[in-house]
Amino acid sequence: GHKSMENAAPSQDTDSPLSAASSSRNLEPHGKQPSLRAAKEHAMPKDLKKMLENKVIETLPGFQHVKLSVVKTILLKENFPYEGGLKIWECTFDLLAYFTKAKVKFAGKKVLDLGCGSGLLGITAFKGGSKEIHFQDYNSMVIDEVTLPNVVANSTLEDEENDVNEPDVKRCRKPKVTQLYKCRFFSGEWSEFCKLVLSSEKLFVKYDLILTSETIYNPDYYSNLHQTFLRLLSKNGRVLLASKAHYFGVGGGVHLFQKFVEERDVFKTRILKIIDEGLKRFIIEITFKFPG
């Protein structure tokens, strides 16, 4: 599955390879493009009900503490010019399970779901009471077709659960999504995303927590990712990163990324959990070496 990622843009949890012809037509390897994909912010659509029309919503099994749902998006491959797709990657599930086991606190924190794909990491932070959640993916179509519907579906379900005394007819009439003002959505290449948020007229408050999964598969991206953490993480903030030990055919992996980070002497990394089933997987914490 990972060979196809050589031409893929960073996205944490999407996996549905396109044909070679279509992928080479639509994508260039990240960092080797003649022009970087400009970043933009995606507005929340006004008609939230319409966004979920004709969508099948499934509850993910195995998460007792947080009810998570995924909108099944059915798109023909030729209409979806993105190498990657709509399957959630296993390292995302590792990180979700870790949130529960380690009782990760989201309340009051500003959170970034970097390379968000379906947005499940950010949605969990949203449900955990984060004060602000930003979702970022390289691909604008992923934000529009996958992330946004997922966030809306999960916030709608939560409101319906809270209103158990209201009659069903009333509850189904209109989604109540009072907390969605906390969420912002961005697409574009990482350095362009940094420029966009840092140049906004309002003073940018850095992130307390950056969540990311399966974004270190290609060593070509390490410099850009390291720079993103450097520019956007608050001085006492932390990154929680989930990854496979090694990505065959692309060359990236945990040990190579840790070495890259250590050589730059800005961050320290700590292994929080090793999942030793089949191909070994890791959850890593990244924090500033010298927060001052």
Image: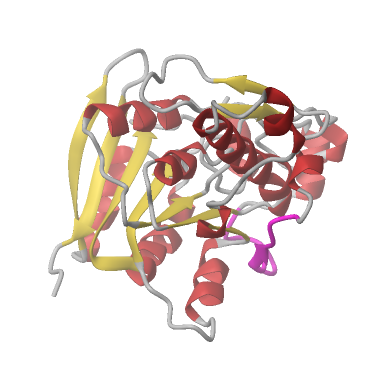
Asked if residue 187 lies left or right of residue 240, the reply is right
- Quarter location, residue 34: bottom right
Asked if residue 9 lies left or right of residue 234, the reply is right
Please name the residue shown 45% across and 62% down the image: 224
Query: Residue 70's x, y, as percent?
Result: 61, 28
Q: Who is closer to the viewer here, 197 or 70?
A: 70
Does 152 appear above or below 165?
below
Q: Which residues are magenta?
A: 30-45
How are the residues colored?
Answer: secondary structure
Query: Residue 189's x, y, as percent?
Result: 59, 61
- Quarter location, residue 92: top left
| Predominant SS along the magenta part | loop
Asked if residue 286 lies left or right of residue 24, the reply is left
Query: Residue 271's x, y, as percent?
Result: 19, 38
Does 81 appear above or below 191?
above
Asked if residue 198 lies left or right of residue 36, the reply is left
Position of the C terminus, as image quadrant, is bottom left
Residue at the bottom extreme? Answer: 201
- Whether residue 58 appears in magenta in the rendering, the answer is no
Please name the residue shown 72% across and 48% down the image: 144
> How many numbered marks, from 0 up?
0
Does 8 appear above or below 199?
above
- Whether residue 35 appears in magenta in the rendering, the answer is yes
Query: Residue 121's x, y, as percent?
Result: 45, 40
Please name the residue shown 69% across and 57% down the image: 44
Do we see residue 88 in this rendering?
Answer: no
Do we see residue 77 in this rendering?
Answer: yes
